Image (cartoon, grey):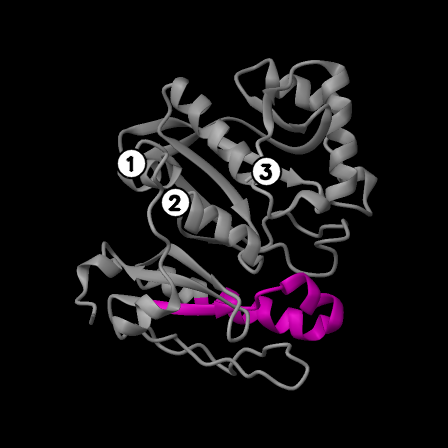
Amino acid sequence: MPKFDIRTLETPEEMALVEELQRQVWPGSETDVVPAHVLLTVAHNGGLVLGAFDGEKLVGNAWGFPGLYEVPDGPRPKHCSHQLGVLPEYRDSGVGFALKRAQWQMVRQQGLDRITWTYDPLLSRNAYLNIARLGAVCNTYLREVYGEMRDGLNVGLPSDRFQVDWWIHTPRVERRLGLRPRRELTMEHYSLAEIPALYEVTVPDSGLIRPPGSVPDLAGPLALLEIPSDFLALKQADFSLAKDWRFFTRNAFEAAFTAGYLVTDFIYEKKPRPRSLYVLADGESSLSDLTVRK
């Protein structure tokens, strides 16, 4: 994996680079570009603005700010990670992971134990990074959290999002970010443990998979929920089908979270066909709790 230089950004000149990066990552809506003066305010008031550089070229950025969340004895501090962007030509090169790992290290030094952020649950590349590689978990589905969005990646669809929790001092997270990260689980592991997919998708000749007509009932300690492996390509090819996936997965995840399930892992496989599946665990269930046939 290439090594990138991760820096904290604090100057107007650096924030101008972040503005330009946003235009390339989320094209089509100048009004959605977070301006340099806001980023400078975040950086100078307890937030973190991080840049990933290939030489002197800014290729990725992550930024966030302090926030609060409620517990029974009152509010507690957290870090709200608002945006992570990587230039299209640097995707899948490790930039996003490097930025989040640096964020993890710096927020721990601030004495905080929780980082939250949102992402579109239908974007499998983001899900793989956030859930499988970083060890975040999720039991919060937010409808239309940003209202109508105008950038080229989001225009036309409800801005539904997962809010994930990254408990940064837990063994779960430390195992994923350490020098010897945990082995990723595959469909074979779940098949051996007799953990079924919650439903079977329809795969027509076009290759654009279709959701079932209704959400099946959840049962058992673990379940697998499949989404399109390339939702942006599917959206471009068949916008109506993309909307079907949005509303189907909205119903599926809301039902799962209401029933006490938690997203704990994500599977991405390329053969025999591209597949992307969330792992839903009931309470504290995990694959290691089950008997896997050798």
Above or below, 97 relative to 221: above
Categorize mark 2 by other alpha carbons within 10 Å: few (<14), some (14-19), many (20+): many
Residue 157 picture location, percent across and down: 68, 61
**Tag 2 secondary structure:** loop
Q: To which quarter of the image does residue 173 belong?
A: top left
Residue 38 picture location, percent across and down: 69, 23
Q: To which quarter of the image does residue 293 belong?
A: bottom left
Whether residue 218 sits left or right of residue 63 in the image: it is left
* Res. 146 in view: yes
Picture quarter with the C terminus: bottom left
Tell me which residue sits at (58%, 57%) in the image: 123
Categorize mark 3 by other alpha carbons within 10 Å: few (<14), some (14-19), many (20+): many
- Residue range highlighted in magenta: 223-252
Q: Nearer the viewer, residue 241 or 175?
A: 175
Q: Nearer the viewer, residue 117 or 91?
A: 91
Residue 145 picture location, percent across and down: 58, 49
Picture quarter with the N terminus: top right
**Tag 3 secondary structure:** helix
Dot 1 or dot 2: first in sequence order is 2
Q: Give the label, 3 or 1, closer to the camera.
A: 3
Dot 3 or dot 1: first in sequence order is 3
Residue 31 circle label: none
Tell me which residue sits at (66%, 27%) in the image: 53
Q: Which residue is mark 1?
A: 170
Q: CA distance from mark 3 to mark 2?
A: 17 Å
Identify which amino acid the numbered label 3 is placed on: Val
Q: Which residue is mark 3?
A: 95
Q: Are marks 1 and 2 in contact (CB under 8 Å)?
A: yes
Dot 3 or dot 2: first in sequence order is 3
